[in-house]
Image: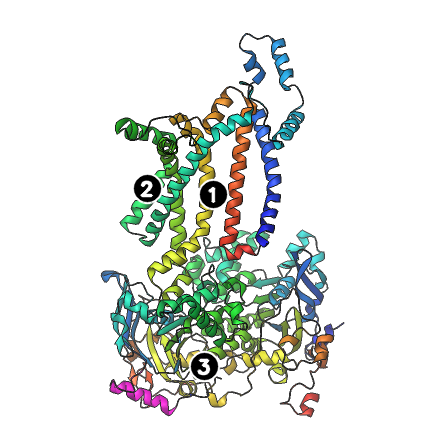
């Protein structure tokens, strides 16, 4: 239903992934639940980079995992194209899920310390065992080369590689499966800035070359704005704003997005930095007992009684731009009325 | 905002001048590091981790120490606190704190400095706090280690410290164990502990790296408040240039165990003089058009023990020339800034505005 | 109040454990080869004699019924009678148990008093000659068999030097110091394994604490080494220590079987052996049951102490 609204106007192609009203709940015992993802709907278009921003506890990783069949939604559906992967039998699922891969923050945890890089990269192919060994080796070598780890790296062990090189190896590893979508869960968060830049460049190259779609999860709004086409902002299990990346930075329509943007430390000299700096009060409420109405209201400087009584729906403000705030049109005093219209 | 009140400019130039004349007097910096070299291991197999580190922190100033991981930032911070193992570490140069060389202190003398005159906070507040004592006990204990006060007074002052860093209901939180607090509150408690004795210098080693952005903003506000209202000098160790430019007056860039550049923060951001600083700044996504290729620094930081003989950045530097292959001295610029690059006069390096 | 609720809750959890233990004891005793009736009847008994004895003792009834009868009695404090002497098992157990408990508790105390300082010393001087000496002693203590060590002690300290009596025991109720004097050597024998275990575990736990990030924070606050070690270090390793003490006690109690045999001490341990040999099944069941109750009680106490010591455990 809401799917069409999220499509960037230019690329009205089929979504690779449709998340339809997905809720993920974890039982805590004694009839209590932690609702990590709460009725989230979104669509990821073929070939785009979909950025998901949120802080710890926002449910962004759980959502990412549910997209690659690692976390079954409690209610709602995840569709890969037209297919419901959670409805597949185990064998069919195994063949299917190779198209939907994930890379994590800590590449060391994803590589077996006793395996050579080549073996680690080849491993997914070994598991599938569809091709002869020689061919699997060739594919693995090719992918290693493709991510910039040529020649000598194949026979090394993870501990001989730097963090950035290990993450490259992880990328090569998922590439061997020829995925159509890769979820990057804080994939560059642990790396130094200049290495981050390297990996971001690599991801962009691979996207062009293989027509990949990325679901890019990060806490770093600057990084997401740079590489994403569409950006969604998550707070306490819900999407509070979703917009084309070029719109979000100046055209945000949710107070939480505003706070995130303002909290991002930008390396600018004092005279060039904006005075608008909002420091959120308090802490993230418990996802076990979220606030009534709008979940952000307890920390929102614009909150009114209405926000406690009535949960704001995620509504469309412009093509491809939705926000869940009763005052989305009016809370920004820095904008002129005509800007709000546009 | 931390930066507004004490933004340097002329002040920074003054600092440089003081340092160059190397006179001790009323303008003597709080912390003056002169040619600090740290090496580990016993004589024959000794590995130098840092070499010729020189910079100063003036009273009430906030100085940012940046660089990629493995550049020697943390080791430098630990050395300033005397927290490196005495056996197995070797130090060159001097670290003058109020004119006294810290490197000459015995363990006993160190104890009266640490926590009392120099405080330190760490990256991971969860693992940096003792899990089986309440945060209140941990703060009181610090106070009682340095002042002759009874438990009740210590408790009152600990509660004061908790209030000072913005912990709500400080007398209730006094009784809380670290695991009962959120990450942000834990880091506040950690700061309260480090400042309880009102040290003149606070060393903050990546204090917000483990925290979320909005919580990070809160913690940075606490630090800014300490810096401005209490006049506490801060040495802010971070890999995040954004945070440093927001919080600090001066910037010191370290690369492979050396200081390669130091100067007033606004000057360095706009006009970095060392290719490494410039490279770090340019690789931030904020300064490149959306979806464009990010300028990155090829290669990686050499490991300690594998440092090249000449310029340590040479192999990764786009501006390298044959003459870079000789050891690089540090140059002092007319502004009082420092740069360790033989081409600094001819290079026009991009900063954040270009 | 919360503590009382917790104790109540833990006691409730103990019930199924005790039940399972009785089933296990009963089943194991049933599996021991040999027929007590045949033993009682003697070598020249006819099959009819044996059958009569079986019937008299109720051994011909189904096993589960025997179990139920025994369990019913046990809950009323009646562990039935010895097949050999015909006396109540409980009386016999209570008569011998103090000797065993004295031995176990004394051994535990020696283990703690020697093991704790040794472990801490090894940790603070880690990677020095002293540490290596302490760890070597510890590994030796684990490796050396108890009974052999016992015999060496007897040969040297009592037969050779005459410092301790070689065998036997004096009831503690009659002569306190005499009881200790008699128990000292066997307790020392028993304690070697405990000392070794406590030293090893405490050493590694303390090294972990001292190299932790919070120990670095404590140094950064200007605390002295002594205060870091004895205040923070000890409180942090106390949890490990508690766990190890529990294990050592259980182990020591088990090891009394061999030690009592070596030193000819009329305790519960040696009684298991002699009863098992003479197929006095009710006696074996009774002793093991009481020992299991002691172990469970000890574990319960350790659990509760754990909750009191560890603020993080209190929540769960």
Q: Residue at x 64, y 25 (%)?
A: C66
Q: Which residues are magenta?
A: B8-29
Pick the residue in front: C158 or C129.
C158
Q: Is residue B298 visible?
A: no
Extreme-left residue of the structure: B44
Residue A29, image x and y in percent? 65, 55
Q: Residues within 10 Å of mark 1 (few under 14, many from 20)?
A: some
Q: Quadrant of residue A56?
A: bottom right
Question: Label 2 to label 1, Cα distance in Å?
Answer: 21 Å
* Quarter containing the N terminus of chain A: bottom right
The residue labelled by disc 1 is C246
Pick the residue in front: A280 or A216.
A280
Q: Nearer the viewer, mark 3 or mark 1?
A: 1
The secondary element bearing badge 3 is classed as helix
Q: Nearer the viewer, mark 2 or mark 1?
A: 1
Q: Residue at x 51, y 41 (%)?
A: C298
Q: Quadrant of residue C259?
A: top left
The residue labelled by disc 3 is B247
The residue labelled by disc 2 is C137
Whether marks 3 and 2 lie on the same chain = no
Total count of labels: 3
Q: Quadrant of residue A321?
A: bottom right
């Amino acid at each position: 239903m809401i799917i069409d609204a999220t499509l960037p106007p230019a690329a009205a192609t089929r979504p690779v992934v449709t998340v339809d009203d997905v809720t993920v709940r974890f039982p805590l015992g004694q009839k209590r639940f932690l609702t990590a993802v709460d009725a989230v709907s979104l669509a990821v278009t073929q070939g785009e980079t979909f950025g998901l921003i949120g802080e710890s506890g926002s449910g962004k990783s759980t959502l990412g995992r549910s997209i690659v069949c690692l976390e079954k939604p409690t209610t709602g559906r995840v569709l890969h194209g037209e297919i419901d992967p959670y409805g597949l039998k185990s064998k069919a699922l195994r063949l299917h899920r190779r198209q939907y891969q994930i890379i994590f923050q800590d590449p060391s945890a994803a590589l077996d310390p006793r395996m050579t890089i080549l073996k680690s990269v080849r491993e997914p192919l070994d598991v599938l065992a569809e091709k002869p060994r020689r061919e699997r080796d060739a594919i693995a070598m090719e992918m290693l080369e493709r991510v910039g780890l040529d020649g000598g790296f194949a026979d090394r062990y993870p501990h001989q590689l730097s963090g950035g090189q290990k993450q490259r190896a992880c990328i090569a590893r998922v590439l061997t499966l020829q995925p159509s979508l890769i979820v990057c869960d804080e994939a560059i968060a642990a790396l130094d800035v200049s290495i981050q830049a390297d990996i971001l460049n690599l991801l962009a190259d691979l996207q062009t070359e293989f027509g990949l779609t990325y679901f890019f999860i990060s806490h770093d709004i600057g990084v997401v704005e740079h590489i994403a086409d569409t950006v969604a902002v998550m707070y306490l299990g819900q999407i509070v704003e979703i917009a084309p990346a070029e719109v979000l930075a100046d055209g945000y329509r949710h107070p939480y997005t505003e706070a995130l943007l303002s909290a991002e430390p930008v390396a600018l000299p004092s005279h060039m930095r904006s005075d608008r700096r909002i420091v959120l009060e308090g802490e993230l409420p418990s996802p076990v007992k979220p606030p009534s109405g709008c979940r952000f209201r307890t920390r929102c400087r614009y909150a009114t009684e209405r926000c406690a009584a009535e949960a704001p729906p995620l509504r469309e403000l412009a093509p491809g731009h939705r926000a869940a705030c009763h005052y989305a049109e009016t809370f920004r005093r820095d904008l002129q009325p005509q800007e709000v219209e546009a | 905002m931390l930066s507004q009140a004490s933004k340097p400019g002329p002040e920074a130039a003054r600092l440089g001048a003081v340092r160059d004349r190397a006179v001790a007097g009323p303008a003597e910096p709080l912390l003056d590091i002169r040619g600090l070299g740290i090496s580990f291991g016993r004589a024959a197999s000794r590995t130098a981790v840092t070499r010729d580190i020189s910079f100063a922190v003036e009273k009430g100033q906030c100085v940012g120490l940046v660089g990629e991981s493995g550049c020697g930032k943390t080791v430098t911070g630990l050395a300033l606190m005397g927290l490196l193992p005495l056996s197995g570490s070797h130090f060159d140069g001097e670290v003058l704190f109020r004119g006294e060389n810290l490197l000459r202190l015995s363990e006993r003398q160190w104890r009266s400095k640490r926590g009392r005159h120099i405080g330190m906070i760490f990256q991971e507040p969860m693992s940096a706090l003792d899990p089986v004592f309440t945060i209140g006990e941990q703060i009181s204990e610090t106070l009682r280690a340095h002042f002759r006060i009874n438990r009740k007074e210590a408790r009152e002052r600990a509660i004061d410290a908790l209030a000072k860093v913005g912990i709500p209901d400080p007398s209730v939180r006094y009784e809380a164990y670290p695991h009962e607090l959120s990450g942000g509150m834990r880091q506040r408690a950690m700061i309260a502990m480090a400042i309880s004795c009102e040290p003149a210098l606070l060393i903050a080693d990546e204090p917000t790296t483990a925290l979320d952005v909005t919580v990070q903003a809160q913690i940075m506000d606490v630090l800014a408040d300490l810096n401005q209202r209490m006049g506490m000098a801060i040495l802010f160790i971070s890999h995040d240039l954004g945070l440093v430019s927001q919080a600090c007056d001066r910037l010191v860039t370290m690369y492979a165990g050396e200081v390669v550049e130091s100067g007033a923060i606004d000057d360095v951001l706009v006009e970095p003089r060392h290719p490494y600083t410039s490279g770090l700044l340019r690789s931030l996504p904020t300064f490149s058009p959306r979806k464009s290729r990010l300028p990155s620094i090829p290669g990686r930081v050499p490991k300690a023990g594998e440092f090249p003989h000449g310029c340590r950045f040479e192999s990764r530097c786009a501006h390298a020339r044959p003459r870079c292959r000789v050891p690089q001295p540090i140059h002092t610029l007319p502004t009082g800034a420092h740069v360790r690059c033989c081409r600094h006069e001819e290079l026009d390096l991009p900063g954040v505005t270009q | 109040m919360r503590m009382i609720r917790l104790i109540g809750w833990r006691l409730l959890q103990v019930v199924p454990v005790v039940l399972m233990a009785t089933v296990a004891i009963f089943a194991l005793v049933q599996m021991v080869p040999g027929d007590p009736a045949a033993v009682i009847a003697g070598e020249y008994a006819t099959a009819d004699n044996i059958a009569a004895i079986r019937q008299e003792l109720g051994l011909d009834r189904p096993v589960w019924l025997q179990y139920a009868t025994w369990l019913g009695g046990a809950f009323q404090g009646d562990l039935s009678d010895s097949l050999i002497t015909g006396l109540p098992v409980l009386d016999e157990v209570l008569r011998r148990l103090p000797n065993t408990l004295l031995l176990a508790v004394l051994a535990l105390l020696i283990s703690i008093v020697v093991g704790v300082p040794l472990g801490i010393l090894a940790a603070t001087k880690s990677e020095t000659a002293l540490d290596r000496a302490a760890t070597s002693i510890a590994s030796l203590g684990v490796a050396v068999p108890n009974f052999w060590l016992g015999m060496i002690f007897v040969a040297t300290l009592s037969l050779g030097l005459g410092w301790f009596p070689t065998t036997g025991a004096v009831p503690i109720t009659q002569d306190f110091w005499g009881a200790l004097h008699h128990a000292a050597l066997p307790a020392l024998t028993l304690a070697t394994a405990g000392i070794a275990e406590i030293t090893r575990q405490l050493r590694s736990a303390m090294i972990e604490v001292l190299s932790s990030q919070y120990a670095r924070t404590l140094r950064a606050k200007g605390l002295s080494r002594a205060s870091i070690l004895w205040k923070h270090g000890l409180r942090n390793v106390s949890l490990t220590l508690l766990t190890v003490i529990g294990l050592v006690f259980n182990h020591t109690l088990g090891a009394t079987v061999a030690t009592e045999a070596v030193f000819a001490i009329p305790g519960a341990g040696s009684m298991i052996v002699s009863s098992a040999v003479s197929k006095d099944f009710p006696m074996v069941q009774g002793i093991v049951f009481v020992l299991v109750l002691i172990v469970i009680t000890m574990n319960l106490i350790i659990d509760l102490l754990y909750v009191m010591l560890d603020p993080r455990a209190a929540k769960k």
